[in-house]
Image (cartoon, rainbow, N blue to C red):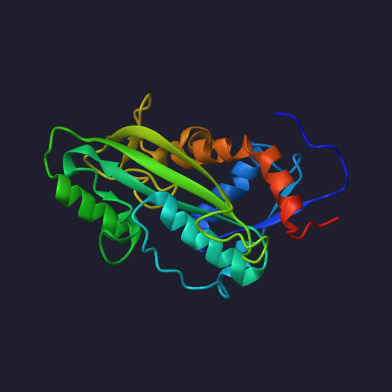
Amino acid sequence: MTAFPDDGQVFSLVLASGNRGKQAEFVGLFQDLGLSSLGFALAGAQCMAAAAPDVEESGQSYEENAALKAQAWADHFGMPALADDSGLEVRSLGGRPGIFSARAAAGSDRDRVKWLLGELGDAPDRRACFVACLVLAFPAGREGRAFPSGYFASEARCFGSIARHASGADGFGYDPLFVPDGYENTFAELGSGIKSKISHRARAMAGMALLCASIKKYWLRTGASVIR
């Protein structure tokens, strides 16, 4: 991957998420993928999340939901926003919980882990995959661009299986149950060092990084703010 010429420009974007687990993952991915050297900076979402808009995830796909969130945050803060929508698809459950993964059961991540184990029971087929779609959207009003046009998207999957018992204390969501292909431990046991290289989100972010040159050109053309 070739770095952009050192012209002193920094393209700052906000991560459209109040999920601290995701925020930490994206900070790590920005470092691992060298996006800072490519001229991109991630604005602090933690302090912005309290003032962020409440977005109804009414889309019928990961991309639609990610685009809804990214566009809402971009318009609200007046700067490009990166949003993620992700989910767990379990084969013996017909692909559920899918886009409803974060809402599959009321309560905490632990409640949803318990729900999934209950739904699967002793099912012999425990194949599953994590899916992540990232969308980078720009504030409306730039050349009249707004959702569903004028954004960049990258989607990826990580295949594996669902363990019979939750294990590990790292990560979030269904990480204590998901064993990625090629490993014998769950994401929550493997830790961020391995997850940041093989996860659905890491792969989707790597795909987004490949679009950096096109993103920069579009960014300059639309007149979105740049830190110099």
Q: Position of residue 136 (x, y in %)?
A: 58, 52
Q: Is residue 188 left or right of residue 38?
A: left
Residue in view at x 69 percent, y 41 percent: 35
Q: Is residue 2 left or right of residue 76?
A: right
Eyeballing the image, is 120 above or below 228? above
Q: Position of residue 151 (x, y in %)?
A: 57, 51
Q: Give the quadrant of the N terminus.
A: top right
Residue in view at x 58 percent, y 75 percent: 51
* Nearest to the observer: residue 218 or residue 203: 218
Q: Tell me if I can see residue 19 in this picture.
A: no
Residue placed furthest toward the top: 182
Residue placed furthest toward the front: 144
Residue in view at x 21 percent, y 40 percent: 164
Q: Quadrant of residue 167?
A: top left
Q: Give the quadrant of the C terminus.
A: bottom right
Q: Tell me if I can see residue 201 in this picture.
A: yes
Eyeballing the image, is 76 above or below 109? below
Q: Position of residue 213 (x, y in %)?
A: 70, 38
* Nearest to the observer: residue 16 or residue 176: 16
Q: Is residue 40 left or right of residue 125?
A: right
Residue placed furthest toward the bottom: 51
Residue in view at x 49 percent, y 62 percent: 69
The image shows a total of numbered marks equal to: 0
Eyeballing the image, is 97 above or below 213? below
